[in-house]
């Protein structure tokens, strides 16, 4: 299993993960949550044959590496809304968005009156 580079942004409302996954489609990638706080992103590492390749063809040069199995795990903070995680794979970039839970209300101070 190989690791792959990830950019993670922390915005006011969500955490956004950007992962380059060239040559993979959405069906090649799995995004899951384990142990209620670990985001897991993995791929099976299989690349489909190129359209120009034919059975019985002789390859002259193979410089592009075959994709290997990829795996990354991220421990999510407590303020993540696990029921609203979304993932989108477009143009070789996987984008995973984890919404944040609203902050707990601030405690209200009540003035005590003495009579």
Image (cartoon, helix red, strand yellow):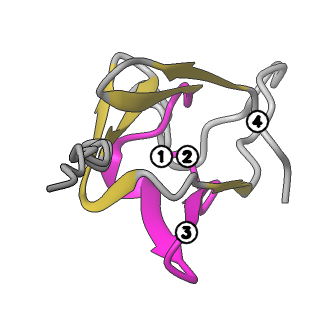
- Pointer 1: what residue? 48
Which one is in front in this view, the residue at disc 3 or the one at disc 1?
Answer: 3
Residue 27, position as x, y percentages in the image: 33, 56
* Mark positioned earlier in the residue sequence (4 or 1): 4
Which one is in front in this view, the residue at disc 2 or the one at disc 4?
Answer: 4
* Distance between the alpha carbons at the discs numbered 2 and 3: 30 Å
Estimate how packed mark 4 is, as few (under 14), some (14 to 19) or many (20 or more) residues with alpha carbons within 10 Å: few
* Distance between the alpha carbons at the discs numbered 3 and 4: 20 Å
Please name whichever residue, 4 or 28, is drawn nearer the observer in this view of the structure.
4
* Distance between the alpha carbons at the discs numbered 1 and 2: 4 Å
* Mark positioned earlier in the residue sequence (2 or 3): 3
Task: Mark 2 and mark 3 in contact? Answer it, CB < 8 Å.
Answer: no
Any magenta on residue 43?
A: yes
- Pointer 4: what residue? 4
Task: Mark 2 and mark 4 in contact? Answer it, CB < 8 Å.
Answer: no
* Mark positioned earlier in the residue sequence (2 or 4): 4
Q: Could you tell me which secondary element the residue under label 2 belongs to?
A: loop
Q: Could you tell me which secondary element the residue under label 1 belongs to?
A: loop
Disc number at residue 37?
3
Q: Could you tell me which secondary element the residue under label 4 belongs to?
A: loop
37 vs 14, left or right, is: right
* Distance between the alpha carbons at the discs numbered 2 and 4: 16 Å
Residue 97, position as x, y percentages in the image: 34, 36
Residue 75, position as x, y percentages in the image: 67, 57
The span picked out in magenta is 20-48
Residue 20, position as x, y percentages in the image: 58, 23
Please name whichever residue, 73 or 107, is drawn nearer the observer in this view of the structure.
107
Q: Could you tell me which secondary element the residue under label 3 belongs to?
A: loop
- Pointer 2: what residue? 47
* Distance between the alpha carbons at the discs numbered 4 and 1: 20 Å
Estimate how packed mark 3 is, as few (under 14), some (14 to 19) or many (20 or more) residues with alpha carbons within 10 Å: some
């Amino acid at each position: 299993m190989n690791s792959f580079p990830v950019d993670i942004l922390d915005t006011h409302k969500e955490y956004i993960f950007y992962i380059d996954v060239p040559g993979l489609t959405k069906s090649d990638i799995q995004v899951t949550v384990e142990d209620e706080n670990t985001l897991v992103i993995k791929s099976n590492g299989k690349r489909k044959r190129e359209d120009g390749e034919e059975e019985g063809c002789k390859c002259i040069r193979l410089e592009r590496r075959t994709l290997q199995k990829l795996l990354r795990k991220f421990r999510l903070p407590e303020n993540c809304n696990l029921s609203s995680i979304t993932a989108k794979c477009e143009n070789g970039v996987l984008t995973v968005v984890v919404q944040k839970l609203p902050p707990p209300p601030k405690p209200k101070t009540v003035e005590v009156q003495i009579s």
